[in-house]
Amino acid sequence: MGLRPKTEERILDAAEDLFFTRGIAATPIDAVIARAGVSAATLYRGYPSKESLLAAALDRRQRAWLETWDTAISRGSDDAGRLLAIFDALDDFRDEPHGSRWCAFLGAAAEYSDPPTEVASAVRADTDAMRARLAELARAVVPEPEAAADLAERLLLVVSGDLAMRLREPGHRAALARSTAELLVAAASSTRR
């Protein structure tokens, strides 16, 4: 028997709030149970381990991130604008109620030197999704597949650096990362002429 949707939402809300603000290792499962207002039996009925709960929280967070990114893409006025929309989405996501001071996926990856399978899979799924989406958007700007993939990798590196800067400087915004990415896009576009 699974969890009721409202109960699952409360558990995931509590896990996200605690894991992504206090840290995964620093958050005992009892704290999640208390914050969610559920029994241990209820939590473990849906999530047999702390890692499976973390993976579910990351999966839900990725879906919310992709929705925010989709919205930012839809506001893009041209192909380059849609590609660079990831930087608008970073700021938009941070400003949402479920936003956090930096990337939950980078945080999860940093906390485990040898991550359990479900955590490694969630982090890999997020990285793969960003890489694939950036490559797809880059193909509209730089049609050659190898050049588009190269541009996507460079942009992924800029995105990751921007997310890390959010730890160093509270209130950090993506403007500098976006202008750096604009230089990369311009350089990639000029080589195809």
Image: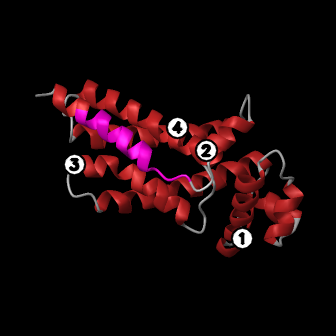
Residue linked to disc 1: 10
What is the distance, in whole Å, between disc 4 and disc 3 at their CAs?
23 Å
Q: Earlier in the sequence, mark 2 or mark 3?
A: 3
Q: Nearer the viewer, mark 4 or mark 3?
A: 4
The residue located at (65%, 72%) in the rendering is 5
Residue linked to disc 3: 79
Circle 4/circle 3 CB separation < 8 Å: no
Q: Earlier in the sequence, mark 1 or mark 2?
A: 1
Q: Earlier in the sequence, mark 1 or mark 3?
A: 1
Q: Nearer the viewer, mark 1 or mark 2?
A: 2
What is the x, y in percent for residue 137? 29, 44
183 drawn magenta: yes
Element at label 3: helix
Disc number placed over residue 105 in the picture, else none = 2
Q: Which is more toward the observer, 138 or 58?
A: 138
Q: Nearer the viewer, mark 1 or mark 3?
A: 3
What is the x, y in percent for residue 95? 54, 65
Q: Which residues are magenta?
A: 172-186
What is the x, y in percent for residue 105? 61, 44
Disc number placed over residue 161 in the picture, else none = 4
The residue located at (46%, 33%) in the rendering is 157
Which part of the image, by quadrant, shows the C terminus?
top left
In the image, taking residue 182 as reference, residue 8 lies left or right, namely right
Q: Earlier in the sequence, mark 4 or mark 3?
A: 3
What is the x, y in percent for residue 182? 31, 41
Callout 3 crowding tier (Cα within 10 Å): few <14, some 14–19, many ≥20: some
Which part of the image, by quadrant, shows the N terminus?
bottom right
How many marks can you see?
4
Q: Residue furthest left?
A: 193
Q: Earlier in the sequence, mark 1 or mark 4?
A: 1
